[in-house]
Structure formats: structure tokens, C-alpha cells
Amino acid sequence: MCIAIPGKVVSIEDRQAVVDFKGNQVKVNVALIQPKIGDYVLIHAGCAIQVIDGAEAEEMLEILGEM
């Protein structure tokens, strides 16, 4: 089973973005999508795979926190 984790885009440079995961900031590849700063994205294996709604991201983080 694979899982994608939501995070918020903090900065973008070329095909790399810094994404915040509840205070932890990580560089991820954004070549597959075109997010904007402030967007929430799903990350799998170091790559952003989808832009999602902020409410959906918060709901997913809440569920993941309960695991």
C-alpha cells in the first residue's frame, strides 16, 4: 500500500519546492504539477503528485495523526 502525505508549498525554484509538513520543511520535486506558493500538495516518494484543497489537506492530516 502506498500513501501520499499533504503539505503546504512554502517556496518554489525551478522544479523544486520547499513544502511544510506540520513544521518540518522538505524539498520535493514539482515537475509533474504546477503548484503556487500557499497551495497544498500531495507528496509521494519525494514528488508532488497533485494539488489539493486546504480543507481536504487538513482532514487528511487529522486522519493520519490518529493512526
Image (tube, grey):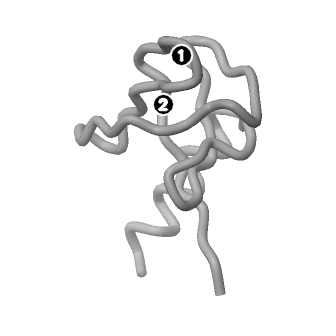
Amino acid type, label 1 = Gly
Quarter of the figure with the C terminus: bottom left
Residue at image location 63% in from the left, 78% down from the top: 2
The foreground one among 32 and 20 is 32
52, above or below 66, in the image: above
Residue tagged by mark 1?
Answer: 38
x then y, percent, for residue 52? 72, 37
Q: For the residues marked 1 and 2, what is the alpha-carbon distance in whole angstroms?
A: 6 Å
Quadrant where the image shows the N terminus: bottom right
Toward which corner of the image does residue 22 lie, by quadrant? Answer: top left
| Res 10 quadrant in image | top left
Element type at marker 2? strand
Give residue 6's position: percent from left, percent from top. 54, 48
Q: Which residue is mark 2?
A: 8
Question: Looking at the rendering, which quadrant does residue 66 occupy?
Answer: bottom left
Which one is in front, 57 or 33?
A: 33
Q: Residues within 10 Å of mark 2 (few under 14, many from 20)?
A: many
Residue contact between numbered discs 1 and 2, judged by CB atoms under 8 Å:
yes
Which type of secondary structure does the marked residue at label 1 adopt? loop
Above or below 67: residue 48: above
Residue at image location 75% in from the left, 30% down from the top = 33
* Residue most extreme to the left: 23
Image coordinates of residue 49 in percent, x first then y, are: 71, 46
**Residue located 38% across and 35% down the image:** 27
Which amino acid type is marked by label 2? Answer: Lys
